[in-house]
Amino acid sequence: MTPETTVFLLTLGLGLVHLAIGAIARAFEVDLPTLLGSRDDLPPRKNLYGIRGERANHNFKETLPWALGLLILVQVTDNANAISAIGAWTYFGGRAVYLPIYVFGVPIVRSIAFVTSMVGLATIVSQIVSL
């Protein structure tokens, strides 16, 4: 399995962690019948960690299609190499660190983690468009 494939699969797993954090935080806010129902009348979130987790999840979902697309593209164009692998791991590392930093409200470092993940994607792009 290539490093890019490994990161692809781990990124999907990270998406599940994002979903779990939101669901767990919500479970502390409303009762079980409400969670099992249609959820048409859910009250606004009150748990600060849940609110931050939801925002982190939205941010993650904004970069997810780009990341998965690039991870596939670098491989199908036969441009996967050590540099694209570094880019893939840099993206994943930035996103993995971003989640707890965001949930616990650490300023500045959160932005650094985000930019790090974007640098990882740019690194992958550099290998796809290299001549």
Image (cartoon, rainbow, N blue to C red):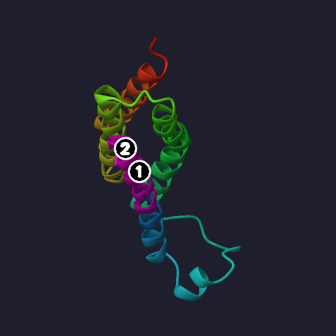
Mark 1 neighbour density, 10 Å: few (under 14) some (14–19) many (20 or more): many
| Residue 126: % across, % down | 42, 19
- Is residue 102 found inside the magenta-colored segment of the image? no
Q: CA distance from mark 1 to mark 2?
A: 8 Å
Image: magenta residue range: 1-17
Q: Write the residue at 28% across / 29% down.
A: 82
- Is residue 6 found inside the magenta-colored segment of the image? yes
| Residue 83: % across, % down | 31, 26
Badge number at residue 95: 2
The answer to the question of whether label 1 and label 2 lie on touching residues, with beta carbons closer than 8 A, is yes
Badge number at residue 11: 1
Q: Write the residue at 38% across / 24% down.
A: 123
Q: Identify the image quadrant of residue 91.
A: top left
> In front: 23, or 67?
67
Residue type, numbered disc 2? Arg
Helix, strand or loop under label 1: helix
Residue at the outermost front position = 78
Residue type, numbered disc 1? Thr
Badge number at residue 2: none
| Residue 106: % across, % down | 29, 44
Q: Earlier in the sequence, mark 1 or mark 2?
A: 1
